Each structure stands twice: as C-alpha cells, then as structure tokens.
Amino acid sequence: MAENLMDKIVALCKRRGFIYPGSEIYGGIGGFWDYGPLGTELKRNIKNEWWKSMVYLRDDVVGLDAAIVMNREVWKVSGHVEAFVDPLIECKVCHVRVRADNKEDIAAHLKTHKDIQVDWTKPQKFNLLVRAYLGIIEGKQSETFLRGEITQGAFVNFQNIINSSRVKIPFGIAQIGKAFRNEITPGSFTYRSREFEQMELEFFVRPKDSEADKWFEYWKKQRMGWYIDLGMKKNHLRFRKHESYEKAHYAKYAEDLEYNAPFGWSEFEGIHHRGDWDLGRHKLMYKDEDLKEEFTPWVIETSGGVDRSALFFLLDAYYEDKKRVVLKLHPKLAPLKVAVFPLLANKLPLVKMAKGIYDNLKAQNIGMIGFDDRGNIGKRYYSQDEIGTPFCITVDFQSLEDKTVTVRDRDTTKQERLSIDDVASYFSKRLN
Ligand code: ATP
C-alpha cells in the first residue's frame, strides 16, 4: 500500500495539474519539477500560512528576500565551498554513483546486478553547490554559485536589518526562496530535487546555553504545532536528533522533523543550533545599546522545505474508499476553496445564478474559487474531492424559486441548504 500510495500521488499530481516532470517534452531533466495550476496554489498557500505565523503574527521577526546569486566570497566564508559535501560511492561494474549514506539506493542498485558481485569505490566527497558564471566574455567570466541554502542572505544582511529596522535581540529574520543543490541521486518524486524552495527562520539569541536551549525547544514546539494545526497527523511526525557524524558543518546540535513517508521516516524540516558559526565567520557583531555590550549572537534556525512539505501534506491528506478519492487537505491549504455548479449547463437561468455566486465569492478574497458545468453533479463532486476542494455549491431549480443553494461538505459529503444571502459570511467563517 505504501509504495502504491506514492504511485497514486505521483499520478494524481500529473493528471490533475499539481506537479509535472520538468522539461518533459524534451525528455525531462533529473531533479527538476514544474508546479501546475493546482500545485502552484497549494505551494502558495503553504508559504502564505508560514509567513503569517512566522512574520505577521509575531513582533520579533522581520522578513527578507535576498538574491539567489551572491558574491562568491559568501560561500567561501560560510564554509560551503569546503564543507557542503555528500559522500559518494561508485559501482565498479557500471559506474553509477550513489550516496554512501543512502541504504535504500545502494540496495536498489545491487538489485539491478542480481547475480554479480558488486564492488564499490571508497566514498568520495562531492560538493553540492551549483556553479554559475557571470559576464558575457568567454574566459573572463566570474564564477559563483546558485545559493545552496537561503540562509546566508540573512547573515550578510544582518547589519542592514539592524540599521534599518527596530529589531532587538532576541529577534528573527524570515525568508522563503529557491535553493539549488547538485544532489547526486535526486528521487522519491520531489523529495530530493536539485531546485527547491526553503522557508527559513534565523533567530538570533544571546550567546548563552540556557538561551539557546530555551529557544531551540520553543521553535521545535512551534514548528511541529504548525504542521499539526494544518492537518498533518500527529502520529506521522517525529523529531530525530542528529548523530554527531551527520551534523552539518555549521551545527552545534540539530534535530530533524521527520514524516512517516511511504519511503520511510524522512526529514522535511531541520531545527539547527548554528551557534556563532555564521556571524563569527562573517565577522559580524551585535551591539546592545541598553546594556552597552557587544557580542556575537547565536542562531537557532528552523529550515523547512516547501516542496517536501507540499508532498507530505498531499500524502497525508490522501483518502480513498470504494466510491471516491479525496484529498482531505486543510481548507487553508486546499487549492480551490469552493466550487460552484449550475445543476444543468444548458439552462441559462441556472448558469446565470451560479455565475453570480461564483463572481461574488471571488470578490470575497477567500482564495481560488472554481466553476464547473461539465458532466453530471456526481462527476463534478468526484473531481473536486480528488483535488481537495472543501465545499461545493449547487444551484438547482429550487434555487430559482427560493434563492437557496446546496452546500456540500467534502469530508462528510453532507449537504445543507443555505440562503444565497448567507453564502459569503458562511464561507468566510468556515474557511478561516
Ligand atoms: P538531506 O539530509 O535530506 O539531504 P539536509 O539535511 O541536507 O537534507 P538541510 O540542509 O537541513 O537539508 O535543508 C533544510 C530543508 O530544506 C530540508 O529539511 C528540506 O525540507 C529542504 N531540502 C534540502 N535539500 C532538499 C532537496 N534536495 N530537495 C528538496 N528539499 C530539500
């Protein structure tokens, strides 16, 4: 069932316009994905909810949108040129390379050789930064990198933000944006991509163990709570402490938030105690004007992946029975919030009334609204369930007489009759 579930999600994503393989008409390109109309909405909803909870609802976090390409020096100083590496082994039979720490990939590769004894090379370090070349004159181009994590933007702008806003320690800088990694073996659908989006908070605290420990625990709780509030099942989530051998070069200690995916427990957000690694390397300090002291703050980071979250929200929401397939996505995440149907497509008064309700709902600013007049009502419900639309409204002949419509709930399939005048307030309540 588990592997099967993954296949079903991949197929649904393609068929209904959530996610397509990148550059597909030219044979694709490993590790790159394009989000279709519904996937774009899902991702946007995830990012909006994250931004709301991390920036709008807080007094101690400000936003930033730093450039993807930075001065090469940033990556040298941050340690990424030297230490942003994965260990790689090569099959001596066919020269395919896999990550030395990925047991599943190794096992899968061994299966391709069946009866042959496979020898592997010793693990070699492989830098994950994607190179980029600037300038138009061949030979005079300067080499830099596409950012391997969005984090560094927050550090190189640390002083700018202090000078231009009124933040005081403890405070955070929040960012959402693309990052790029030359992953050796992209796979598990979007889980390991070469281009992906991160949503990250760098939270600056006083350099004291008690402060760091307190905020680390605080952010662990916040982040796990955020996923649960948006409908992820608690028993599908767990934290896992990093062993010393797997800690990133910048981390004092770290824990991964993992999801129980069909391919095993898998990280999709990391809570990292980065200590003074980054600010120290960039030679940046914080001046406390009240206490008249200067110090290098420590950083507690929450680093989540938008794509991995989207994938896990989809897997978690998938439900099927004999009659239907449903994405039980939280209404805040569902690509369409409401879909409006006229009972019959060829009865003008029904279509007109349905269009009126549709236009009104669009103007309410509650998110994307759908309209469907194809096929019969049963098929339309099926189609909306499969993409996770929480509510459907049907305009029928009774509507023309008494100005009421039926509202159908995705999860219970229960229908109720509602006055057209109450539709807007009903949804603004149910969707918020
Ligand atoms: P992994 O061990 O799976 O390679 P990581 O520990 O290197 O991940 P981090 O550097 O902590 O990941 O990145 C923070 C987050 O960014 C991850 O939790 C994940 O959600 C996302 N992320 C990292 N690499 C990828 C990738 N190749 N594809 C999609 N998302 C990614």
Image (cartoon, rainbow, N blue to C red):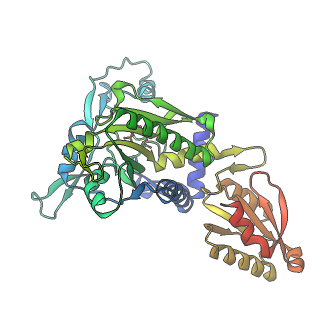
User: Can the viewer see residue 374?
Assistant: no
| Residue 315 picture quarter | top right
Q: Tell me what residue is drawn at x 63 percent, y 62 percent.
A: 336
Q: Among all residues in the image, which is located at the extreme left?
A: 140
Q: How many marks?
A: 0
Q: Which of 298 and 250 is in front in this view?
A: 298
| Residue 214 picture quarter | top left
Percent x, y of residue 36: 52, 60
Q: Among all residues in the image, which is located at the extreme front?
A: 291
Percent x, y of residue 135: 16, 63
Percent x, y of residue 340: 73, 69
Q: Tell me what residue is drawn at x 74 percent, y 55 percent.
A: 410
52 left or right of 30 in image: right
Q: Tell me what residue is drawn at x 71 percent, y 63 percent.
A: 429
User: Can the viewer see residue 108?
Assistant: yes
Percent x, y of residue 373: 73, 71
Q: Which of 142 and 120 is in front in this view?
A: 142
Q: Tell me what residue is drawn at x 12 percent, y 63 percent.
A: 137
- Give the quadrant of the C terminus: bottom right
Rendered-image quarter of ligand 1: top left
| Residue 302 picture quarter | top left
